[in-house]
Amino acid sequence: STAIIRDELARVMERMENTSSVKERQALAMHLDGYSYSEIAERLGCTAKSVENALGRVRRKLINS
């Protein structure tokens, strides 16, 4: 149901807030909004590889928590 999904999303967001860096959260938000790695990199002032690494860390943190 919608309430269960909302609760799970809140739990994930709290976990992200507690375990991820600002850069990781920004990269994730832009990725979820449909930006490419190169677009995210340009906006964050880093390389596409740095974005790839940040999103990899986010995935590992979400899977392992």
Image: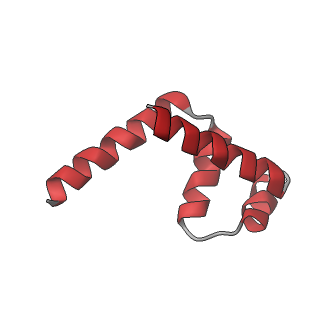
* Residue 3 shown left or right of residue 38 in the figure: left
Q: Which residue is drawn at 72% across and 61% down?
A: 40
Compared with 37, 47 (above or below) is above
The image's colouring method is secondary structure
As rendered, which of 21 and 60 lies closer to the eye?
Answer: 60
Compared with 17, 55 (above or below) is below
* Residue 33 shown left or right of residue 51 in the figure: left
Q: Quadrant where the C terminus lies?
A: top left
Q: Quadrant of residue 33?
A: bottom right
The image position of residue 20, as x and y in percent, is 57, 34
Q: Which residue is drawn at 73% across and 63% down?
A: 37
Q: Quadrant where the N terminus lies?
A: bottom left
Q: Which residue is drawn at 79% across and 65% down?
A: 38
How many marks do you count on the picture? 0
The image position of residue 45, as x and y in percent, is 83, 53
The image position of residue 27, as x and y in percent, is 64, 52
* Residue 35 shown left or right of residue 5 in the figure: right
The image position of residue 59, as x and y in percent, is 56, 45
As rendered, which of 22 and 5 lies closer to the eye?
Answer: 5
Q: Which residue is drawn at 70% across and 69% down?
A: 36
